[in-house]
């Protein structure tokens, strides 16, 4: 029981510290790393079914959400990076879904 | 400025103000203008690719002309739904799903809906 | 009794199987009939003239343009490329045969050895590589000039894509067909949405051409490409155009000569079997 209380106290302490430390970017960075992995996986999944959209990462797109997110993170702007990753992930998932829905598309006159 | 218009000036302003007041009951003139801009913009709504809209240059004729919308869509929510995802109503529709595919943001769709509704 | 039953049953099974996948020939018949009914009075070969077959005004402008066609100088350049020997002394004739008028009609073709669709552009670059020459770029420039010459020489012959009775060839055809009819990109549009559902109607100021006859005049000289080119060379290949039509619906375009585009070309050109080759064409 004592142990439990101590552990509880410790977590509280850590959580409390975390909330008050000014080093917010550290947790943003962690969020970014997870979000990047998710986005990359979603994009590969869409590409594998030929469902990738234009503005995710294609070299001639003006938006290139995925590479732009990586660039923003490299410049330390994780908030911007997360926003861009959210769009990239949405587009990748929507492209995959679209390809699945269109699996049986065929002549219709 | 020629004389007649000069004299008309104040009257016109008053009239414009009146109209503005009437419209603001629904959507402000500014909002309608913003909605129109989004509807015409090639990288936004690009509705003119397929629809004739009063005052829009080089309209296409793939979809029906967007006129008298209040009589065709008495329920504004239905109009918004058509713009948000035309394929929910007709799965084969050529009209891009503006909301479902986030071609426009929710706010932009509100503005476009108000504008189209005013036609 | 039992026999009759099984016969009936298998007949039933067969018809359902046939409904699932129609043969290329059946697809072609339905495709052609659809456009012929939609545009009565237009001659079959005229569908190869795209929007100019469908609109009298545009046709007049185009006909006056055709009196001094801007693609002519590129046909001449292509002829030069055809005739210029490689460093090893051989020339394109060593790969394609002596008669340049007999080349274009063979493409796209199914290659049973490599089990894939081979395009004219593919064989042009293969010929260059096999002879120790540097291959051309895929979408414009020399490859399109040579294509323009070979198309010009073949004018009047009928498109004749052969889909052999090989499951792999049919699979490639089916993939190309699916590509044409599947919605893609953020704007959620299929090739067929524009070119089957709405030909003759306008997107903005542009009139949509029919899917029928859409490949007979490639490579094409496009005024839009002319403007974008530093030296006014408006020539481009079919896959350049495919890329353009994918981009505009906000889908990521595939590479020229990718499997996807070669299979699309296989289906797309097969649908125009029996139409005259009228390459190179001019388009806005």
Image (cartoon, coloured by chain):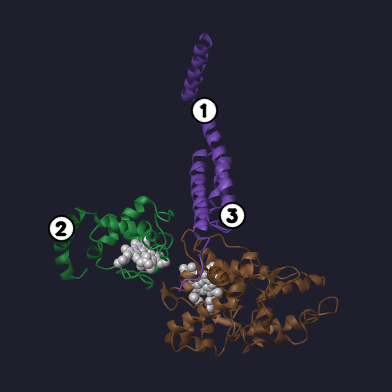
Chain colours: A purple, B green, C brown
Residue at which label 3 appears:
A47
Mark 1 or 3: the one toward you = 3
| Residue B84 spot, x, y in % from top left | 36, 56
| N-terminal-most mark, 1 or 3 | 1
Query: In the shown orientation, is residue C169 left or right of residue C202?
Result: right
Q: Secondary structure at mark 2?
A: helix
Q: Would you place residue C23 above or below residue C75 in this image?
A: above
Of residues C240 and C264, the one drawn nearer to the viewer in this rendering:
C264
Confirm whether residue C65 shows in the render.
no
Q: Are marks 1 and 2 on the same chain?
A: no
Chain of the residue on which disc 2 is drawn: B
| Residue B5 spot, x, y in % from top left | 18, 68
Residue at figure coordinates x 57%, y 80% from the top left: C272
Q: Residue furthest front?
A: C1
Of residues C120 and C113, the one drawn nearer to the viewer in this rendering:
C113
| Residue C102 spot, x, y in % from top left | 71, 86
Residue at which label 1 appears:
A23
What is the quadrant of residue C107 in the picture?
bottom right
Q: Quick check: marks 1 and 2 in contact, CB under 8 Å?
A: no
Q: Residues within 10 Å of mark 1 (few under 14, many from 20)?
A: few
| Residue A78 spot, x, y in % from top left | 52, 38
């Amino acid at each position: 029981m004592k142990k439990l209380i101590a552990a509880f106290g410790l977590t509280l302490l850590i959580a409390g510290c975390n909330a008050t430390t000014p080093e917010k970017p550290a947790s943003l960075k962690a969020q970014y790393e997870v979000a990047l992995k998710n986005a990359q996986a979603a994009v590969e999944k869409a590409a594998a079914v030929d469902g990738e959209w234009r503005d995710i990462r294609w070299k001639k797109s003006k938006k290139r959400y995925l590479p732009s997110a990586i660039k923003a993170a490299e410049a330390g702007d994780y908030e911007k990076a997360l926003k861009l990753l959210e769009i990239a992930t949405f587009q990748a998932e929507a492209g995959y879904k679209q390809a699945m829905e269109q699996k049986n598309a065929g002549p219709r006159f | 400025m020629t004389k007649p218009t000069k004299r008309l000036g104040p009257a016109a302003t008053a009239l414009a103000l009146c109209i503005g007041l009437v419209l603001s009951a629904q959507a402000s003139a500014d909002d309608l203008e913003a909605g129109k801009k989004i509807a015409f913009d090639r990288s936004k709504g690009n509705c003119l690719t397929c629809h004739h809209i009063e005052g829009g240059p080089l309209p296409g004729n793939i979809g029906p002309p967007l006129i008298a919308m209040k009589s065709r869509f008495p329920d504004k929510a239905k109009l918004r739904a058509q713009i948000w995802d035309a394929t929910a109503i007709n799965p084969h529709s050529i009209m891009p799903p503006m909301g479902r595919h986030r071609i426009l943001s929710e706010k932009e769709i509100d503005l476009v809906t108000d504008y189209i509704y005013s036609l | 009794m039992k026999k009759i039953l099984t016969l009936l049953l298998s007949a039933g099974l067969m018809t359902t199987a046939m409904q699932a996948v129609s043969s290329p020939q059946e697809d072609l018949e339905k495709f052609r009939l659809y456009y012929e009914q939609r545009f009565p009075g237009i001659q079959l070969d005229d569908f190869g003239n795209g929007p100019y077959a469908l609109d009298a005004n545009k046709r007049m402008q185009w006909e006056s343009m055709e009196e001094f066609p801007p693609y002519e100088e590129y046909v001449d350049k292509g002829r030069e490329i055809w005739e210029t020997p490689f460093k090893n002394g051989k020339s394109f004739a060593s790969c394609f045969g002596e008669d340049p008028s007999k080349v274009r009609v063979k493409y796209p073709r199914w290659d049973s050895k490599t089990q894939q669709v081979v395009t004219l552009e593919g064989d042009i670059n293969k010929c260059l590589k096999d002879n120790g020459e540097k291959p051309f770029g895929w979408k414009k420039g020399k490859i399109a000039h040579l294509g323009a010459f070979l198309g010009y020489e073949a004018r009047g012959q009928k498109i004749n894509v052969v889909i052999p009775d090989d499951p792999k060839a049919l699979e490639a055809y089916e993939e190309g067909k699916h590509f044409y009819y599947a919605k893609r990109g953020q704007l959620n549009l299929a090739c067929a949405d524009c070119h089957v559902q709405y030909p003759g109607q306008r997107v903005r100021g542009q009139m949509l051409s029919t899917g029928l006859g859409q490949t007979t005049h490639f490579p094409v000289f496009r005024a839009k490409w002319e403007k974008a080119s530093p030296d006014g060379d408006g020539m481009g290949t079919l896959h350049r155009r495919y890329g353009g039509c994918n981009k505009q619906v906000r889908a990521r375009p595939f590479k020229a000569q990718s499997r996807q585009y070669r299979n699309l070309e296989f289906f797309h050109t097969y649908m125009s079997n029996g139409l005259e080759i009228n390459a190179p064409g001019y388009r806005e």
